[in-house]
């Protein structure tokens, strides 16, 4: 089973890749929901750092517990995307934690108390004080906590390969469960980030990453006037440009594996549809004959309406000129397409 994962920088059109591959009869698509548990904060990558790279008496246990909470939150509050795994997500997560844990013990430390908030910390300290008072232990080093014999700690010192083997087993189990008909390809949105791809490819037995970029003028205008999510700093165009530069700074490492990572422009899927279609098929290793429902989910004639938006929003000319002067290398050449009769 080969995994195809699209990735983006926010608003750069990765869903076009998901929709495109959803039109193939030999690809199972998990849809446009973003499955980010490998790379989000407190996700698998953070867990690897604390289990493998910075293992110590407290970091590892705390990181494992953070991932357990993170995974539970994704299932309960993640807009329903994880429902596709049914109860298998909880079972697979529990087994994954077992695979990377060498000892579980009822111990606690101050971070466990802090995680429960200020009120609990106050109550716990009051509890400890009065218990020491009643037992005439105020002059001793003895301390008490409501967490004693209740808080579970996780201890592990597994090596990198053991950890990676457990992650691959975890990922494969979840995607295989969702892929009920066991199709040879699985399309999943945002399972990897567009940065540090070398690190995240290690989490799969077989994965192809497709990262999309988009004209920064259109992203700016869409966020400012249509999406209005508040995710991007678009009130000040200079802040937006700095954000854009920062988020792309480490996107193209010299040692990136181009046989497993493809970077494309969203606009090429529209203005150069046939050419880009073949590039995507060749990269993923899928024969184009399996594209049995072309343009039924990703329709370039619809998506083109969300490109080259400068004329749609008069009054933004100064902001657009600033973006054009600062982000030249990211601008899409719409004029060239128009000159060629597009």
Image (tube, helix red, strand yellow):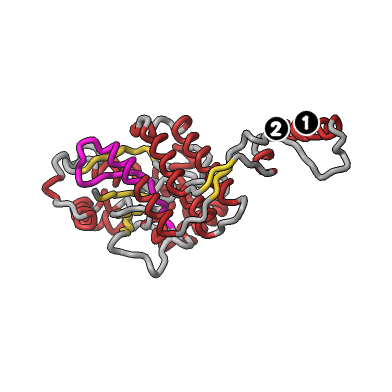
Residue at the image position 35 percent from the left and 54 percent from the top: 211
Q: Are marks 2 and 1 in contact (CB under 8 Å)?
A: yes
The foreground one among 85 and 97 is: 97
- Read off the magenta span: 171-195
The answer to whether residue 308 is above or below residue 327 is above
190 in the magenta segment? yes
Q: Secondary structure at mark 2?
A: loop
Snapshot quadrant of residue 201 = bottom left
Left or right placement of residue 41 versus residue 167 in this view? right
Residue denoted by label 2? 146
Q: Is residue 203 left or right of residue 43?
A: left
Query: Which residue is at a point 87% across and 38% down the rendered structure image?
Result: 138
Tag shown at residue 104: none
| Residue 75 visible | yes
Residue 233 shows in the view = no
Q: Position of residue 300 (x, y in %)?
A: 25, 43
Residue 146: image x %, image y %? 70, 32
- Tell me the residue at 73%/31% (across/down): 119
Q: Is residue 203 left or right of residue 117?
A: left
Q: Residue at the left extreme?
A: 289
Figure check: 284 above or below 146: below
Label 1's element? helix
* Of the pair 341 and 61, the residue shown nearer to us: 61
Look at the image and say whether residue 187 sits in the magenta stretch: yes
Q: Find the distance from the CA under tag 2 to the CA under tag 1.
A: 8 Å
């Amino acid at each position: 089973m080969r995994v195809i994962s699209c990735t983006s920088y926010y608003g750069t059109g990765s869903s076009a890749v998901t929709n495109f591959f959803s039109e193939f009869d030999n690809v199972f698509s998990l849809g446009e929901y973003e499955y980010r548990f490998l790379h989000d904060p407190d996700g698998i990558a953070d867990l690897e750092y604390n289990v493998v790279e910075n293992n110590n008496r407290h970091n590892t246990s705390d990181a494992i517990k953070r991932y357990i909470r993170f995974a539970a939150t994704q299932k309960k509050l993640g807009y329903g995307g994880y429902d596709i795994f049914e109860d298998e997500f909880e079972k697979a997560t529990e087994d994954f934690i077992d695979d990377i844990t060498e000892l579980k013990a009822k111990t606690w430390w101050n971070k466990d108390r802090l995680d429960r908030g200020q009120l609990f910390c106050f109550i716990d300290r009051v509890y400890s004080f009065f218990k020491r008072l009643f037992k005439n232990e105020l002059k001793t080093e003895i301390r008490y906590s409501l967490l004693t014999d209740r808080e579970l700690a996780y201890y592990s010192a597994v090596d990198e390969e053991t950890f990676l083997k457990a992650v691959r087993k975890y990922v494969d189990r979840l995607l295989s469960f969702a892929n009920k008909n066991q199709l040879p390809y699985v399309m999943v949105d945002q399972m990897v980030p567009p940065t540090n791809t070398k690190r995240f490819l290690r989490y799969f037995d077989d994965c192809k990453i497709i990262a999309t970029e988009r004209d920064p003028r259109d992203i700016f205008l869409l966020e400012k006037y249509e999406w209005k999510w508040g995710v991007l700093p678009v009130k000040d165009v200079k802040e937006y440009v700095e954000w854009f530069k920062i988020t792309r700074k480490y996107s193209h490492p010299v040692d990136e594996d181009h046989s497993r990572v493809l970077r494309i422009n969203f606009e090429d899927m529209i203005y150069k549809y046939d050419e880009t279609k073949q590039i995507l098929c060749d990269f993923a290793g899928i024969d184009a004959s399996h594209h049995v429902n072309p343009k039924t989910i990703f329709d370039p004639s619809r998506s083109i309406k969300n490109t080259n938006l400068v004329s749609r929003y008069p009054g933004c000319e100064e902001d657009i000129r600033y973006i054009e002067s600062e982000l030249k290398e990211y601008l899409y050449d719409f004029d060239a397409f128009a000159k060629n009769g597009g």
